Image (cartoon, rainbow, N blue to C red):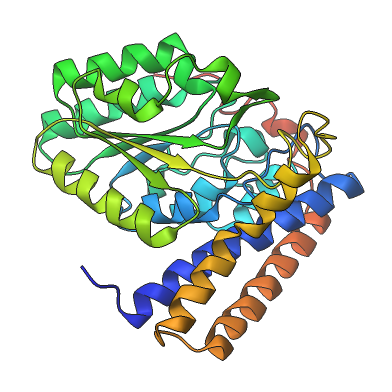
Amino acid sequence: MQLNRDDLKRAYRTMMTIRAFEERVEKEFADGTIPGFAHVYLGQEASGTGICFDLTDEDQIGSTHRGHGHCIAKGCEVEGMFLEIMGKQGGICGGKGGSMHIADMDKGMLGANAIVGGSPPIAVGAALTQKLRRTGRVAVAFSGDGASNQGTTLEAMNMAVVLQVPMIFVFENNGYGEFTSAEYSVGAPSLTDRAAAFGMPAQSVDGGDFFAVQAAMREALEHARAGKGPYALETHCARFLGHFVGDPQKYRGPDELAAARANDPILRFRSKVADAALLETAELDEIDAEVRARIDAAAAAAREAPLPALATLEADVYVKY
């Protein structure tokens, strides 16, 4: 299916919003306005955008500790995200979740998750609900190469096949589980082949190419929505920064870091649409300016926003029946 001009603009706007948001998070963290840790999605924008591009608000995703990009790609508002990350009133989760626990049920965002391999079991449950209710919707679990080794993930993959639920496992392989190379820590030569061994179709795709990711995800969606069970995608990404903001990255050589930047998914998108005369450079530049203005305004407002009232400290901690 060919994407029209509006589709292309939407895809580019999403990727640029992720890029500008994460660059601002990096700056705010350095300024001390963001508590805790921050794990940015810089360099992986095409993966999350391509995966979420054809999802609806009724489709559900489970995310990771590096979840800001997934949230934005799924439609979460950046204004509420900045408030949340800075721990302020009005945040998507009331300022209580922070960077690694953003959730927005109205958008089908089941939550980022600081537990490595935490989202696959949750997404299996969501997918089972979709199957039993015959909604035609799917659940997606984002994981990294590090989470691919977790028992929670492997058990979830087996259960998804056994129950034949409409679920898509997405492994964003950026080459590192925190600070450890996947070449060392992943015994299987291919995450794609390992996923296929559980009994589901699996594809490997260039995670820096929006068009490749979106096309592969469309195949996965057609499979899952047709009641044929789960599907797995491995997107190969290049992480621009370290595991967390401030990681000195002593385990990566300068040539590797330069190669990651040279594989910039946003520049690749711009080049493709310009070469094919699908969008003008001026149109893309206009989107850049609009996005950065919105991000600047959202971050500035979050800086000035009040902290949650003390009276709300124990609210939403326990479910009351």
Left or right of 201 in this view: 35: right
Q: Position of residue 41 (x, y in %)?
A: 62, 46
Vertical placement of residue 36 versus 87, above or below: above
Res 210 → quadrant: bottom left
Residue positioned 23% across, 21% down in the render: 160
Left or right of 28 in this view: 186: left
**Quadrant holding the C terminus:** top left
Regarding residue 82, the answer to whether it shows in the image is: no
Q: Nearer the viewer, residue 288 or 149?
A: 149
**Quadrant holding the N terminus:** bottom left
Left or right of 95 in this view: 53: left
Q: Nearer the viewer, residue 131 or 210?
A: 210
Vertical placement of residue 125 versus 66, above or below: above
Q: Residue furthest right?
A: 31
Residue positioned 14% across, 31% down in the render: 131
Question: What is the total number of numbered labels drawn onto the structure image?
Answer: 0
Q: Position of residue 81 (x, y in %)?
A: 62, 50
Q: Position of residue 54 (x, y in %)?
A: 30, 57
Residue positioned 56% across, 86% down in the render: 281
Res 125 → quadrant: top left
Q: Nearer the viewer, residue 175 or 298?
A: 175
Regarding residue 217, the answer to whether it shows in the image is: yes
Vertical placement of residue 31 versus 126, above or below: below
Residue positioned 57% across, 65% down in the render: 266
Vertical placement of residue 310 versus 214, above or below: above
